[in-house]
Structures are given as C-alpha cells and as structure tokens.
Image (cartoon, rainbow, N blue to C red):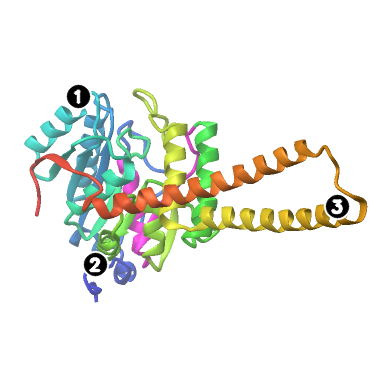
Amino acid sequence: MWRTTRSSCLADAVTHAGPPIHVTMPDGKSSESPVPVPGQAASFKYSVVIPVYNSEGIVGDTVDRTVAFFNRMGWRYQIVLVNDGSADRSWDVIAGKADMDRNVTSVNLLKNYGQHTALICGLKHTTGDYVITIDDDLQNPPEEIVHLVAKAGEGYDVVFGRFRQKQHSFYRRFGSRLIAWLNRRIFGQPKDLEVTNFRLLRRDVVDRILTYRTNFPYLNGLAVRLSSKRANVLVDHKPRKVGKSTYGFVQIYSLVTRILYNYSAFPLQVISMIGFCVAILSFFAGFWFLVKAVLFGASVAGWASIVVLVSFLGGVNIAIVSMLGEYLIRLVRQSAENSGYHVATVVNPHE
C-alpha cells in the first residue's frame, strides 16, 4: 500500500527502489555518491515553499535551479514563493516567475511577518504529497532535495537536512544551540535530531500543522510535536553568494521569545519560582529581625537595609508583572486577530 489516511508514503517502495541516481550540480560536479531513490518517487507530487525577503539578486536563480532539478528528475512539482514584506524588488522577480511558469505560485504578504509565519502561509498554498522548505539564498542547494526524498523513502514523515559544514556566523550558531536546547525541553526534540530550515514534511504532518491555531507559528517545533518518525540526512550547505544574511540578533531574540511565550509556561514557572524563593527568604529575614528586636532591641539606623530590601522586592514584583503582561498581550492578540498575516496579492494560485 502506498497511501496512509490522507498522505502518500515512500516507505513501501524501498524494496522496489530504482537504480541509484547521480545528481549533477550546476558547476558540473556530481554529488559525493549515487543517491538511491525509491522507484515510485516519481508518482508523487512535491511542493517547495520558499520564504523570500530582500533577495532580488538571487531568488530568481534559486527558482530556476529548483525547476531544473525537478525537470531533470522527472518529478511533478509545485513551487510556492512567499514575499515577506521585502523592501527591494523581490516581489517583481517572483511575480514574473509565476507569470512564466504554471507550476510556480507567488504570494505577496501585506508586510513583514517573519519567516515562520511566511512558511505557514506557503504551506496553505501547497498541494503536494510532500512539502519541502528551503531558503531563498541558495545556501540550501535545490539539488540536495534528492537526499530528503531518499530518506523519506525509509518510512520517515519528517526529514531535516543536517549540514555537513554550516556556513553561518558565530552568533547564529550560538543562537541555533540555544534554540535546540529549547526545542528539546519544550517540544521533546530527540537529542540526536538536528532541526534546520531545510526540511521535508509528509502531507499528513502539514495538515496537522495547519490545524494548529496560533498567530505565532514555529514550524520546526510543530513539525517535531506533530510527527512520529523524524530523521536527519546529511546535505551540503553553501556560503551565500549574493548580499548578506538578514537573520541577525533581533531575529534570534524574536524566535526565542516566540518559542518561550507561545509554546511554554517555562518563563512564568521560572519567575514564579524566583518569587517563591524570595518570599521564603523575606519571611525568614523578617522573622530574624523580629527576634533580634525583641531580644536585643531595635537599631535606630537600618534605613539603608529597608531601602535595599524594598527595592529588591519591588524589582522582583515588576519582573513578575512584566512577564504576566507579556502573556496577556499575546492572548489579546490571539483573540483579537483571526489570522497571523494578511495577503496582498497572489499570482498563479493553485487550489
């Protein structure tokens, strides 16, 4: 059988795998080894979602190489490009691609909502049995998709590309380690699993993600939480050839707070524990000063101790109120808005 409840599965075709396929890169070099692809991989449709942000100089090449890869493999495909409020001519480039190719859909968001929100928007426009997400800057070569498909053929419903050598800055690698720690604590990510933006999701996993109601999506966490069999596969990661990455400290901080405040009560639990500990210490301190005053008499001075103690307790109270306020703000936004994003234009939609 090749069908599960609503999705296709490559696993049953593993024993019927076709001949190994050599993937030739645009520079003329072949991949390190032949890639054994399940024999019936061509019977499925693959959707590729690419979030686009200020990449007019390279996103066109990304689309062309993705199209060339699928044509070379003979696989049915769909490419969904989501312009996430780019300030340059990225929309003009991807709109032109959709005008020229019926397999390309371009979506223009009203403003910048963030990468993961753009990805969710893209998922809603996909029609494939499998959905693949890649970046717009060719750091994830489209030719490496063949490794994701081959791994999915072993029965996995989510496959993440594990980069042989990351081409990221130090602060971004540090941010990745921090986010990985949060994923393990909050989403139950296995220690031996590495999540990246280069991923393949089976259709049923995509459907479950789209039913998860939140205006602050985090795709990696949802993919781990809403799937049962996840795996990594080694892929290449290339340096960015045009421009520079727009993923900086602010974006990492935004992602960390999105994970913490929308998928976990961890910050509230930490602050509550601190408040509880401070309350216990304050109780013992007050009891000690009371006993001291009864036994030895009260000190006339002491105003400095009072000021310090009141200031410290006031700071803790402010921290707790601020934390509660952050949760309240997000709850208000969640109930006030029926969508985490708004679309301005769609070129060549596929229903």
Q: Position of residue 14 (x, y in %)?
A: 33, 68
Return the x and y of residue 85 as percentages of the image width and height: 24, 33
Instruction: Give me the residue at 64% from left, 46% from top.
Output: 313
| Lower sequence index among marks 3 and 1 | 1
Q: Is-magenta flag for residue 151?
A: yes
Mark toward the start of the polypeptide (2 vs 3): 2
Quadrant where the image shows the C terminus: bottom left
Tell whether position 294 is magenta. no
What residue does disc 1 label? 89
Examine the image and state in which quarter residue 223 appears.
bottom left
Quadrant of the image containing the N terminus: bottom left
Q: Amino acid at mark 3?
A: Ala
Which corner quadrant of the image does residue 302 belong to? Answer: top right
Q: Relative to 231, say whether 195 is above or below.
A: above
Q: Return the residue nearer the eye: 171 or 157.
A: 171
Q: Amino acid at mark 2?
A: Ser
The x and y percentages for residue 8 are: 24, 67
Q: Amino acid at mark 1?
A: Arg
Q: How many marks?
A: 3
Q: Secondary structure at mark 3?
A: helix
62 in relation to 132, above or below: above
- In percent of the image, x 30 and y 63: which residue is there? 205
- Marks 2 and 3, how far apart in space? 77 Å
- Label 3 close to label 1 by CB (< 8 Å): no
Mark closer to the observer (1, 2): 1
In what element is the residue under mark 1?
A: loop
Q: Is residue 32 visible?
A: no
Indicate which disc residue 8 carries.
2
Q: Which residue corresponds to mark 3?
A: 293
Residue 173 in the figure: left or right of residue 344: right
Q: Which residues are magenta?
A: 142-168
